[in-house]
Amino acid sequence: MIRFSFPSHAWTPTPDARLCWLTIVTSSDGTGNFTSPLTGNAGRIVLNRLDLKVAERIKPIIASSQVITNIDPYQSQLINRFRRGSLLVPGETLLVLEVAPAAYINFAANEAEKGSSIKLNHISSVGRFGRMWLSGSEAEIIQARDAATSALEALEGVEGR
């Protein structure tokens, strides 16, 4: 059983809205279509409750996109020094992508992983800009970059403030 706690100053959730919070965190496809076998249209429920529309969200901006080919062993050692998972191997290609607002980097990483077989070396979605490092072969990285950038550019929204 999953329990949710809401602060006393927050709106009083209905039983169907309580279930949708987990779905929003785990099943967002970036287009506002939040679906789950448990809740159906969870995103729509929350947006209606908060009196918001998908079109009112801030459109993501790609602040930086760099592809670094043929990583040197010394460079990979510096990048890998605090890693515990996916390591950057010398000779691979590295993609550094930065997006504002920061939360959109999670969507971009998901689309990049769907688009090609790459390794996610680092992701940070805290602060003004979200940042991710992906590694793999040059062809895979180009494919991942194209998938992530096209997905971000396809999102609707208002210009950032």
Image (cartoon, rainbow, N blue to C red):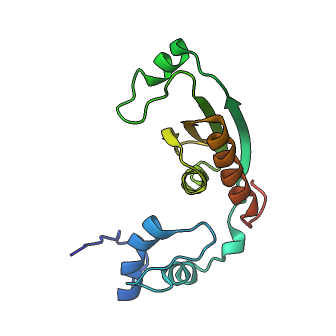
Q: Is residue 122 above or below residue 37?
A: above
Query: Residue visible at 55% across and 16% down?
Result: 75
Quarter of the image for residue 6 reads: bottom left
State the residue in front, 80 or 105.
80
Please identify the residue farthest to the top as the structure is shown. Answer: 74
Q: Position of residue 2 (x, y in %)?
A: 25, 73
Query: Residue visible at 57% across and 23% down?
Result: 91
Q: Is residue 69 visible?
A: yes
Query: Residue visible at 42% across and 84% down?
Result: 39
Q: Is residue 12 visible?
A: no
Q: Could you tell whether 134 is left or right of 62 in the image? A: left
Q: Is residue 70 above or below residue 152?
A: above
Q: Position of residue 58 (x, y in %)?
A: 70, 60
Please identify the residue farthest to the right as the structure is shown. Answer: 159
Q: Position of residue 51 (x, y in %)?
A: 60, 80
Q: Is residue 15 above or below residue 114?
A: below
State the residue in front, 136 or 54.
136
Q: Position of residue 154 (x, y in %)?
A: 74, 63
Query: Residue visible at 58% across and 16% down?
Result: 72
